[in-house]
Image (cartoon, helix red, strand yellow):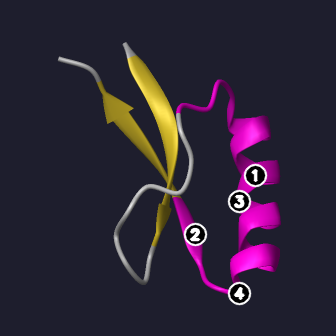
Amino acid sequence: MSRLVLIDTATGRRVRHRIRSMKQALKQQEWYEAVLGRRVRIEKVFER
């Protein structure tokens, strides 16, 4: 099972909890970049 998370590229920390779809992740990425003024990347995280 995998999930999508947003990572702040400047700090390397997670910005948001689990995201269900790529569409939602792209909207959240755009919003956080506008609010934070920094780049945010989307990563797929696999559960063990």
User: How far apart in space, not on screen, are marks 4 and 1 (Cα)?
Assistant: 13 Å
Q: Is residue 43 above or below residue 40?
A: above
Q: Look at the image and tell me in which quarter the N terminus lies.
A: top left
- For label 1, the residue is 28
What residue is drawn where x is 30% and y is 27%? 46
Label 1, residues with CA under 10 Å away: few <14, some 14-19, many ≥20: some
What residue is drawn where x is 27% and y is 20%? 47
- For label 3, the residue is 29
In the rendered image, residue 18, in percent from the top left (x then y), is placed at 54, 31
Identify the element where label 2 is drawn: strand
The amino acid pointed to by label 3 is Gln
Left-right relation of 4 to 32: left
For the residues bearing labels 3 and 2, Cβ distance under 8 angstroms: yes
The amino acid pointed to by label 4 is Gly
Residue 46 falls inside the magenta stretch: no
- For label 4, the residue is 37
Q: Look at the image and tell me in which quarter the C terminus lies.
A: top left
For the residues bearing labels 1 and 3, Cβ distance under 8 angstroms: yes
User: How far apart in space, not on screen, are marks 1 and 2 (Cα)?
Assistant: 9 Å
Q: Residue furthest left?
A: 48
User: How far apart in space, not on screen, are marks 4 and 2 (Cα)?
Assistant: 9 Å
Label 2, residues with CA under 10 Å away: few <14, some 14-19, many ≥20: many
Identify the element where label 4 is drawn: loop
The amino acid pointed to by label 1 is Gln
